[in-house]
Image: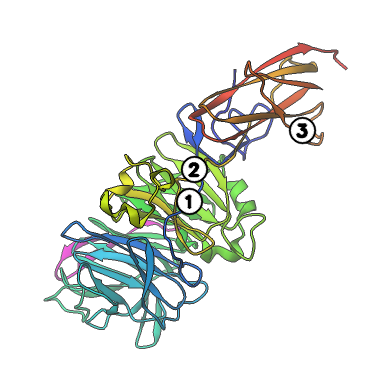
Amino acid sequence: MIPLGEYLPDLPSFNNPGATVANNVIPTVMGYRQLGSISPYSTTALTARAQGLGSAQGGDGVVEMFAGDATKLYRLVDTAWTSTNTGYTTAEDSAWRFAQFGNTMIATNYADEVQKWTLGTSSTWSNLAGSPPKARHIAVVRGFVMLGDCVESGTPYTNRVRWSGLENPETWTASQTTQSDFQDFVGEGGAITGIVGGEFGIVLLERSIFRLDFQGTPLIFSANEISQTIGTQVSGSIAALGRRIFFYSDDGFYMLEDGSKLTAIGANKVDSTFEVDFDSAFASRVTATIDPVNHLYILSYPGSGHTAGTPNKLIIFDWVNNKWSTANFDHELVARSLSTGFTIDTLDDISTNIDTLAFSLDSRAWVGGSVNLAAMDTNHKLAYFTGTGLTATLETSEFQPMAGRRSFVNLVRPIFEGSGSTVTVQLTGRNVGTGSISFSSAVSINASGNAPVRQDARYHRARINISGGFDHAQGIDVTWKARGKR
């Protein structure tokens, strides 16, 4: 069997130990599996492109979901987006970012005053009290709300983080008593591009990374530089789960673990291919999220073929199996969301026909607080990856069945599992490394699972297309005969 190995597009095609294309799939330990298309969940849409999505669970267990566009903030009521506030001035290249502090949801977009929503109580957003600075980034670090890339009294401080009083998100005057204060990151790191909260704070700048450790008075936080050369200029590429943080830097993809260990996860695998495909002119449209169920880091971006900056690609990393894959469809953003929860009685708000529900009845999505991989589609609706499986495209590396000689391939048998799939095979071949690549017409597999093909070449490559549902795709078996040496 010729395996559909790890997606390694940066390596040469011949004798590549992995796959050269792995599109619309999720990597597994022994191949790939289906990725579902996004299916609309909300029955109404935002009035403009989504520029942020967040959800929070209150102390009573009730989940509330929010979204923002250039001028409005919204709340999801059952399955309908309801505008709660208008008149905001979110820039085209900016975003709404959300953070939960206890029963308070906080939102910031850099242009307007920081907003707050009391879970279970509020019907509109209001200004967060205490005169916090306007800011691009927000996180909760221990008992503090922390803002980064701030504007104070009209003056921008791109390298400043400011934090609230301890356990009080509405106290912002620097004080040893409340422990509210700020930190400027001097040096050559550039502007702050993201903050990740938790037990300690991780502050990412354009060209450096700092860790903030709580010390109490008088320092409050100590700042320790993790990297003097690695950072990120693409704020939306940052996504975190626990002590694991992912981001895209000038020289590729990285994972930061435990606040100290940096690992290059895309080097000699996908970094070069991504750099060519990514349209950095629309870097502000990049979003990233974590699928904790499938241990995936997912980055959405405008790649080749995009329309006016609309993200049309995903690049996906499985950190358990240390493998990559891609996907291709238009959307506005990706995010991790908490389900709002339904009962049998309230399912009628979704559909009166159980056969048309977005999720199966045993899905965790119907349970309030379950974590789901979400997106906003190009109609500005909330969507989940629960639709029909995307058409998968998988390509082997170039293989040479007979060393030093041409061979005639007359049968390809895809190795996959799953019912209801439509599978076709295409081949391309060449006799020298400088030869052009042109795939044959697609050939369907027969009742025996074989695709009868005809190709005479020294080097062969197979493309497998799978539409409909499938569980695993592992590789191909090939039948061939040796041909002449010339």
> Is mark 1 in CB contact (under 8 Å) with mark 2?
yes
The mark that comes first in sequence, 3 or 1, is 1
Query: Which sits in the foreground, 410 or 110?
Result: 410
Does residue 210 appear to the left or right of 459 in the view shown? left
Quarter of the image with the C terminus is: top right
Residue assigned mark 2: 36
Q: Name which quarter of the figure residue 304 lies in.
A: bottom right
Lower position in the chain sequence, tag 2 or tag 3:
2
Tell me if I can see residue 397 in this picture: no
Q: Which mark is residue 441?
A: 3
Choose top left, top right, bottom left or bottom right for residue 346.
Answer: bottom left
Q: Residues within 10 Å of mark 2 (few under 14, many from 20)?
A: some
Q: Which residues are magenta?
A: 212-231
Number of the front mark, 1 or 2: 1
Percent position of residue 187, x then y: 41, 69
What predominant SS class does the magenta segment belong to?
strand
Q: Amino acid at mark 1?
A: Ser
Number of other residues with Cα within 10 Å of mark 3, as a class: few under 14, some 14 to 19, many 20 or more? few
Name the mark on residue 39: 1
- Give the number of callouts: 3
Question: Which residue type carries mark 3?
Answer: Ser
With respect to residue 424, does 409 lie above or below?
above
Tell me which residue sits at (49%, 33%) in the image: 33
